[in-house]
Image (cartoon, rainbow, N blue to C red):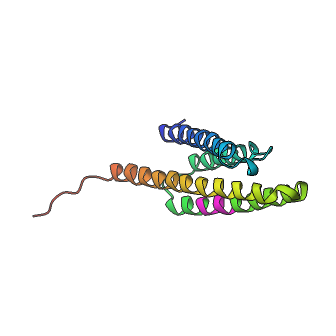
C-alpha cells in the first residue's frame, strides 16, 4: 500500500467518523424531530463508496492523466446514480420519513463531494510532483 493511499484511507475514515458522530450529535440535541432510526446507514454508505473511490484511484496509472480525469468523472456519475437509487428505495420503504432522510443524505453528499474533490486535487498534485522529479533538470543556455 502506498503512502498516498494510506493517507487517503486514514483521512477518509477520520472525516466520516467526525462527520457521522458530529451530525448524529447535532441531530440528537438540536433537531430531535428529524432524527432517524436508519441514520447510521448514511455514513456507512458514504464510507463504503469512499473506499471504492480510493481503491479505483490507487490502481490508476499516474502516467495517464486523461484516464484519471475520466475515472473521476465516472466515479461521480456512479455515486450520483447509486445515491438516487438509495433515496428511491428508502422512499418506497418509508414514505413518512423520506424528507428527513433526503435532507440528511444531501448534507452528507455535499460534505463527501467536498472532501473527495480535495483528495482528487491532492492526487493530481502528487502525480505532477512525481512527474516533475523524473524530468531532467533544465540547463541554462547562455
Which residue ends up furthest to the right in the rendered image?
Answer: 93
**Front residue of this view, candidates 64 and 121:** 121
Q: In screen coordinates, is 97 left or right of 76?
A: right
> Magenta part mainly helix, strand or loop?
helix
**Front residue of this view, candidates 37 and 117:** 37
Q: In which quarter of the image is residue 10?
A: top right
Q: Where is residue 108 in the image (x, y as percent from the top left)?
A: 65, 53
Q: In screen coordinates, is 114 left or right of 95?
A: left
Write down the region rendered in magenta.
72-77
Which residue ends up furthest to the left in the rendered image?
Answer: 142
Q: Where is residue 26 in the image (x, y as percent from the top left)?
A: 63, 45
Up/down of 27 relative to 69, above or below: above
**Front residue of this view, candidates 131 and 104:** 104
Magenta-drawn stretch contains 117: no
The residue at 35%/49% (across/down) is 134
The residue at 64%/41% (across/down) is 25
Q: Where is residue 53 in the image (x, y as percent from the top left)?
A: 63, 50
The residue at 68%/63% (across/down) is 77
Q: Where is residue 40 in the image (x, y as percent from the top left)?
A: 74, 42
Please tell me how many numbered marks the rendered image carries.
0
Locate the C terminus and report the quarter of the image it occupies: bottom left
**Front residue of this view, candidates 4 and 42:** 42
Magenta-drawn stretch contains 76: yes
Locate the N terminus and report the quarter of the image it occupies: top right
Amino acid at each position: 500500500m502506498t503512502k498516498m493511499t494510506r493517507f487517503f484511507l486514514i483521512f477518509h475514515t477520520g472525516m466520516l467518523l467526525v462527520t457521522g458522530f458530529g451530525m448524529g450529535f447535532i441531530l440528537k440535541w438540536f433537531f430531535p424531530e428529524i432524527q432517524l432510526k436508519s441514520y447510521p446507514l448514511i455514513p456507512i454508505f458514504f464510507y463504503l463508496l469512499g473506499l471504492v473511490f480510493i481503491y479505483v484511484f490507487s490502481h490508476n496509472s499516474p502516467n495517464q492523466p486523461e484516464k484519471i480525469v475520466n475515472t473521476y468523472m465516472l466515479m461521480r456519475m456512479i455515486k450520483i446514480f447509486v445515491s438516487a437509487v438509495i433515496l428511491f428505495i428508502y422512499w418506497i420503504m418509508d414514505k413518512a420519513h423520506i424528507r428527513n432522510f433526503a435532507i440528511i443524505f444531501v448534507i452528507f453528499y455535499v460534505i463527501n463531494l467536498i472532501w473527495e474533490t480535495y483528495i482528487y486535487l491532492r492526487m493530481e498534485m502528487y502525480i505532477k510532483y512525481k512527474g516533475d522529479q523524473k524530468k531532467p533538470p533544465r540547463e541554462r543556455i547562455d
